[in-house]
Amino acid sequence: MKKHLIITIDGPSGAGKSTIAKKIAERLNYKYVDTGAMYRGVAYAFKYYGFLEKEEDKLHEILKHLPLEFHFKNNAIVIFNGNNITEDIRTPEISMLASKLSQNKTVRYFLTEKQREEGRSGGVVIEGRDTGTVVFPDADIKFYLDAREEERTKRRFLEFKAKGLELDLEKLKDEMKKRDKDDSERQIAPLKIPEGAIYIDTTGLDIEAVTERLMDYIKVRL
Ligand code: DC
């Protein structure tokens, strides 16, 4: 019988985590959990309600009652107030807000618990910044995806372009740099290579090649 592994994928923005995690989940018929979408969903809701400067002691209650739903299967769907906001959370503004909010310990503890609930029974590919270090440090297989900075920026730029958004390349580069720096230097659950993780540099590799490389490590564990 096939094993229901917990597979984590961490790495900086634009390293290909979402694309690859989705592909792997599809191949294995596993659940795909996008933890970044959860931070983005909370950022979207906080912006909507103007909660960004809320007092710390009220945060947990606020988080518990947000009309926010996450549906993870072979895709990550985020619903807010009954509306599908999966695409709306992918803007540069929400990226920066999510990164800022992710420094808050109440937000992190709240979402980390939800992420553990999603993946606990295995058969899951979960990706983000701390999935192999904090969310599932005992995961069956941990990956860390990386790529050279210019390539990561270019990938993001092309993603936005495909959606009809022409962004300033230099501005996008600065924002991604700041976000990666903040995510790596924050006090709680900073982005880093998890202990025992397989490090893969995806620079110059296409999606299929990266998927195959990860699958080679996974197959022997199934
Ligand atoms: O993966 P992403 O770009 O959608 O994530 C958006 C932000 O959310 C990221 O800049 C930092 C935060 N995040 C986090 O702190 N921990 C995670 N596991 C995932 C995302």
Image (cartoon, grey):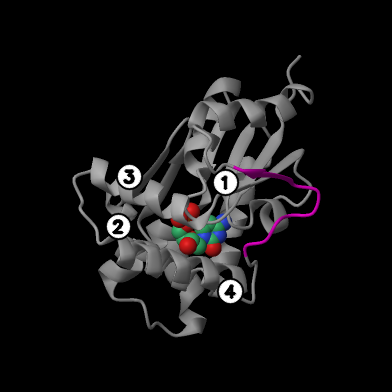
Q: Which residue is mark 1?
A: 127
Name which of mark 2 and mark 3 comes first in the sequence: 2
Name which of mark 2 and mark 4 comes first in the sequence: 2
Please report contact status of discs 2 and 3: CB closer than 8 Å, yes or no: no
The three-letter code of the residue at mark 4 reads Lys
Residue stretch in magenta = 191-201
How far apart marks 3 and 1 lie (CA) works out to 19 Å
User: In what element is the residue under mark 4?
Assistant: helix
User: In what element is the residue under mark 2?
Assistant: loop
For residue 80, above or below residue 222: below
Q: Quadrant of the N terminus?
A: top right
The three-letter code of the residue at mark 1 reads Glu
Left/right placement of residue 187 relative to residue 137 reads left
How far apart marks 2 and 1 lie (CA) works out to 19 Å
Q: Is residue 196 magenta?
A: yes
- Residue 15's x, y, as percent? 52, 48
Q: Which mark is residue 159?
A: 3
Name which of mark 3 and mark 1 comes first in the sequence: 1
Q: Which residue is mark 4?
A: 105
Neighbour tally class for label 1: few under 14, some 14-19, many 20 plus, Cα within 10 Å:
many
Confirm or reject: label 3 Cβ below 8 Å from ligand 1.
no
The three-letter code of the residue at mark 3 reads Glu
How far apart marks 2 and 4 lie (CA) works out to 24 Å
- Residue 184's x, y, as percent? 60, 68
The main secondary structure of the magenta stretch is: loop
Camera-nearest label, 2 or 4 = 2
Neighbour tally class for label 4: few under 14, some 14-19, many 20 plus, Cα within 10 Å:
some
Camera-nearest label, 4 or 1 = 1
